[in-house]
Amino acid sequence: MERLPRWADLMLVPLISLALAAIISAIVIVAIGQDPLEALNTMVTGAVGSAYGWGYTLYYTTSFIFTGLAVTVAFHAGLFNIGGEGQAQLGGLGVALVCLSMNWPHWALALPAAAIGAALFGAAWAAIPAYLQAKRGSHIVITTIMFNYIASAFLVYMLVDVLRPAGQMDPATANFPPGTELPTLNHIPGLSLVFTKGVPANVTLFVALAAAVAVWALLWHTRLGYQIRAFGKSEPAARYAGINPFRIIMIAMLISGGLSGLMAINNVMGEAGRLVQNSSEGAGFIGIAVALMGRNHPVGVVLAAVLFGFLYQGGAELGLWTSIPIELRTVVQGLVILFTGALDQMVRMMLTWAFSFRSPSQARGA
Amino acid sequence: MADQAEKGRQATAAPSPYAIELKGISKAFGPVQANRDINIAVPRGTIHGIIGENGAGKSTLMSILYGFYKADAGQILINGTVTPIPDSQSAIRAGIGMVFQHFKLVQNFTVLENVILGAEDGFQLSTSLSKARKALEALSRDYELDVDPDALIEDLSVGHQQRVEILKALYRQAEILILDEPTGVLTPAEADHLFRILKGLKEQGKTIILITHKLREIMEATDNVSVMRRGTMVDTVKTAETSPEQLAELMVGRKVLLEVEKKPAAPGRTILKVEDLRVKDEHGVERLKGVSFEIRTGEILGIAGVAGNGQSELLAALGGMAKATGRIEMNGAALPVAGRGADGQSRRTAGIAHVPEDRHHYGLILDFSAWENVAFGYHNDPKYQKNALFMDNAALRADTEAKMATFDVRPPIPALAAKNFSGGNQQKIVVAREIERNPELLLVGQPTRGVDIGAIEFIHKQIVALRDQGKAILLVSVELDEIMSLSDRIAVMFDGQIMGFRDPETTNERELGLLMAGMSGEAA
């Protein structure tokens, strides 16, 4: 078996996958009678062409880092957590309950409390599928998907019947007290020189980056991470080593759910300032693609989150400034996920084939 | 090698006496030269052995002959004619049949259905079935194959399944039969039967290539033997004119001790006492049916038996990997056999180290680096921790480097993934990890499976050295030679029970073989 050089595997494969996704997207845009170059220009200008655009792109990036890390941690334990969406919505509930619980004097106090609430609620929502997997063998993919629907329905109930202030028309909580308002990038000293206009990206971005570092340290520098990875690679071997499967499944899923839940401090607390229906807007699912593309490594996850942030923001710009329908954003994202997540093995095979011609003596063999 | 190949070249003009000739075969996988200018000539109607350590290039060579790989250079001659073999279909057309180490049979098909699979002709299955039935009955009769065409594969013993593989090849008119490590899964009696079949085939003019690492089989069954080492063909000799010692030296490139040198055992007090140990598998079937024995310090107890007679379950129960009932006493204190405390960590704390039977499945995480694998099972050891929070990866790497030096692991690169080491070096990593713990009791399962001769010698020495330090060792192996030469006492298992204990000095292979087949000389 010939193998690819490491640099080609890490850099060329995602880039070619992206290029393929872009080409197919361009064909689709041409097919609906629009100009793909104009579309690309609009996306780039809108998402990364200005500090203002970056302010939006990074806001989405923040959410995707959390959900991408969530998928990553579970993946290393050999678990496919598809429930990021539901866990993020429950995290939103945790944030809302914390923020509405008292008149917070300062955001610096409210943020850690809300983060704990978000993580606890997200983790709790992941705990049930985790328990069912560990004790009953119910497949975690199935149960986490189902728990997304339950979460969605549960939030509708909470927003309509429990948390909605009397007399309010829409299913949402009251606005959070002013003391919970997180500084956006344009309000942070230093960064405010760059971000002159109001942007949604906020201090949660730094929490997300810290989480990425923490996940990296956890997985590769702690005993727990060692056991998670060993269990994920081989359950029989883990049993031989005396690693308790129940414990690892529970802990990995609690961490994963907690990370998904943490996303809510970005969108619910940092941006909306209240909890609305479907607050996570699909970020839980995007996390799967982010983790796949980021090769389940925190550094890769952060980079992939930036890319998907760009796609989200650029796609929104498309709907705003061109006559290309906003639905095309979903098409482009779908293609990127298809090529970077599902079909990257195809690209890898083609590259391996190409490389075997270039330098047969350098290719590594078994 | 040279004169054999020379003869082959001269003979090509006249009708060749050789069924197969390989000339100048080379194959590289990247930087690894798996085969380098291989010349070999196999006379028709002989059994030709090919031996060599793991990674010597035997499998690559046979894969080239069977069309799985394309050689970078060289020619294949079948019956004196140059025959390119780009795929296995061409190999079958050229009359080559292959019996793989891992059988390629459909478990819930009958023998007949398996035999015609891929060779069905005609629109209706029934015509090929009835045609095959006749052919099969004739083949079975001629070659003492003795297989019921209507039996389901899953109901057959491993030995019978292997015969189905041979039948498949013969049904496809194979004139040349290649067998890859055919006796790894057989009892001594089954192996003898296989060799009788092969001799019968030979008498009918078939040519047989036997790939094995067992010198005894080469000496017993073959006419000529070719020795491979590091991708090259070292020599081809007449079996009658060589000796196991000479072959081993050719394989390894230096003198090898085939017999394990050891002093008489000096057993001390009883350290492990097992009483009525029973284990059920996941289907609720009892696999270990009430086993009782004791091991003393400074003693190697060997467990002989054909694979799948409860040895794996015994190791699993002792190693804390499987729930059991009964009693396990270590140093006079009972160890839990199920539930809390019956896990790998507790066993290690109790002083039991475990070299598992299947290093790929249990002993190693193949994607992990060597240093990560050195911590495997001992990841809670304080000396691998930097502080309460983090592991000390640097200390672990240094420890791995030291172990690699002591155990001569090659290449000595701690960061290399376990899967990139050869079988022998992987096993050395596992053995180093377990033995360096200086355990009171070492459980060893198949310590030399898929391990080359040089490493076998080394691993055996380590096990004996541990015994001489006064430690107890439970050795499980399907290699009777290994059991006979290492053990101080032998217990034979059959069908989940111990059939009896024997002294290696006074017993013989025949007696052990009978016990392994469930025929007991005494009341068990």
Image (cartoon, coloured by chain):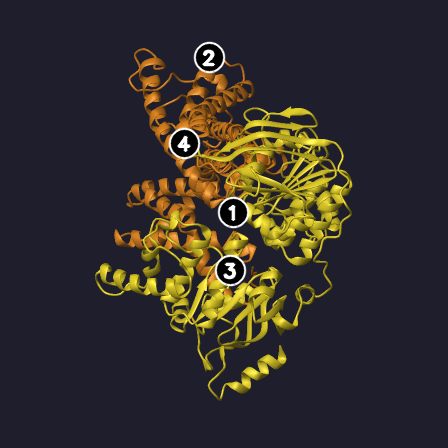
Chain colours: A orange, B yellow
Amino acid at pointer 1? Ala
Q: Which residue is mark 1?
A: B517
User: Which residue sits at x=38%, y=62%?
Assistant: B140
Q: Is residue B325 left or right of residue B267?
A: left
Q: CA distance from mark 2 to mark 3?
A: 60 Å
Secondary element under disc 2, as helix, strand or loop, is: helix
Q: CA distance from mark 2 to mark 4?
A: 27 Å
Q: CA distance from mark 1 to mark 3?
A: 41 Å
User: Which residue sits at x=37%, y=70%?
Assistant: B173
Secondary element under disc 1, as helix, strand or loop, is: loop
| Mark toward the start of the polypeptide (2 vs 3) | 3
Amino acid at pointer 2? Ser
A159, B434: nearer the viewer? B434
Q: Which residue is mark 3?
A: A1
Q: Is residue B70 above or below residue A284?
A: below
Q: Which residue is mark 2?
A: A101
> Tag on residue A83?
4
**Viewer-nearest of discs 1 and 4:** 1
Amino acid at pointer 4? Gly
